[in-house]
Image: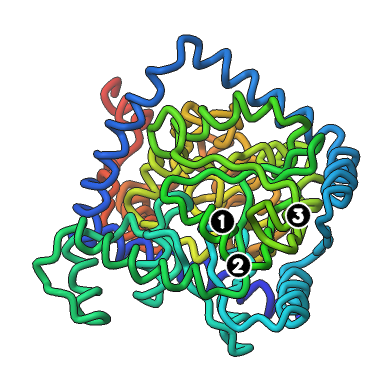
Amino acid sequence: MIVNQQRTDMSKAKEFLKASEKKSFDLKHRNTIRFNMAKYNIAFEKGLSQFSDLEGLKQKVGSIKRKALQDWDQYLLQFESQFTKNGGQVFWAETSEDAVKETLRIIDLHKGKTLVKSKSMTTEEIELNDALEAHGIEVVETDLGEYIVQVAGEKPYHIVTPAMHKSKRDVAELFHKEFNMPLESTPEEMTQFVREKLRKKFTSADIGITGGNFLVADVGGVALTENEGNGLMTTAFPKIHIAIVGIEKIIPELKDLHYLWPILAAHGTGQNITSYSSVFTGAKQSEKESGPEKMYVILLDNGRTDLFAEKEQSRALNCIRCGACLNVCPIYKNIGGYTYESTYSGPIGSVITPHYKGFGVFKHLSFASTLCGKCTEVCPVKIDLHDLLLYNRKKAVESSSNFMWDMAMYGYKSVMNKRSYLDLINGKLANSGSQFFMSSNWGKYKKMPNVADQSFSKQYRRKDE
């Protein structure tokens, strides 16, 4: 059984390497990503310029998240108590299956058939759309980027900009194929088309589903920030609102949003603040008020408490999902979001995914980094991501055994520790061995320099003779 598991783990890693190589040499993909990220970089620098003391703000935001995690259980219980007092209902989901099951139960309770959904990586994590569609429930993504990838039959490419991998030509061709729109349609025309199409979905939907950027403990609120108004529409028209939120999103007080929202906006999209920022504290209390008649919050664990148990890697739970680390990562920019085969990609995804989806299967992501430290540098809550990747690598090595690799390392250590052993290896043997190692481990695009026929010490002694 253990042998079979190890084979599965190794094949997953090999699939990752193969997909990475293919995507790295996809020039169309590279040009699209460079173009889209260049626009982000300009906005990012402009967004950061609004802060007179950026490092001080990072320290403040980081301390808010650390404080929340230090008393995680107390703040979550406070949130539940306050939200329940406001007339809402809270459900705790240990696994993704539990979250899907509870969502289906609520939908069935209210006889829901059509559903609109605002952008939510948590629902992507639990693969909610597939589960709902399998039960005959129509699900419509209402974020423009999410809508595009849904129409294309794809998953989000990026945790903030789901369709970053598509050019406007790609979207025009997609809409021409699916909706018979003219190929020369402009981005404005395509956006207007989607807006009109979604407006009908909003007004006819039975249920609206959102995620949540933060859970505010002292008021029992779900904080949601977005740019298109689709989050508000998702919660305003349907009679039922379901929010599915990871338990790590908890923050102590409403006033903390004063610091969190601006720094999230600046790092995520380069804005001073996003267009729509809302806090939902429950269903409407009277007919005079607007909003849903019932509101439910599903608090998702799904591996988060396992990650919390890791002394060092638990710091990754401070993440506010701005996506900045993806945008600066040289690996992500070359291999793309889909290669990770995970909801969360890039440096943060490489840290948390093994703990969420199985360390044995996804431990190879811990090595998907150059350890350049750029991700740590841009992180708004000062998570030392490159260090956490090293801790994951340590765990990966300790949790696996490769007899051939262990023997090779033992042999290498033995030779390198004794000069006379090292001199036994001539240049031809060293060159053959290095080329074999390079082709089998480091890829066919790198070459080792040729080793001299004799070692320096032997050449030196011959010179004296």
Q: Nearer the viewer, mark 3 or mark 2?
A: 3
Q: Nearer the viewer, mark 1 or mark 2?
A: 2
Classify mark 1: residues with Cα within 10 Å, few (<14), some (14-19) or many (20+): few
Please state which amino acid type lies under the numbered disc 2: Pro
| Alpha carbons under labels 3 and 2: distance apart | 16 Å
Identify the image quadrant of the C terminus. Answer: top left
Residue underneath mark 2: 238
Q: Which mark is residue 408?
A: 1
Looking at the picture, tell me which residue is in the foreground, 112 or 286. 286
Residue shown at the point (34%, 30%) measured from the top left: 456
> Helix, strand, or loop for circle 3?
loop
**Residue beneath disc 3:** 286
Disc 1 or 3, which lies upstream in sequence?
Answer: 3
Q: Residue at x 82, y 46 (%)?
A: 309
The amino acid sitting under disc 1 is Ala
| CA–CA distance in space, label 1 to label 2 | 62 Å
Quick check: can you spot residue 304?
Answer: yes
* Viewer-nearest residue: 239 or 113: 239
Q: Position of residue 348 (x, y in %)?
A: 56, 45
Mark 1 or mark 3: which is in front?
Answer: 3
Q: How many marks?
A: 3
Question: Residue at 46% of width from left, 31% of height from top?
Answer: 273
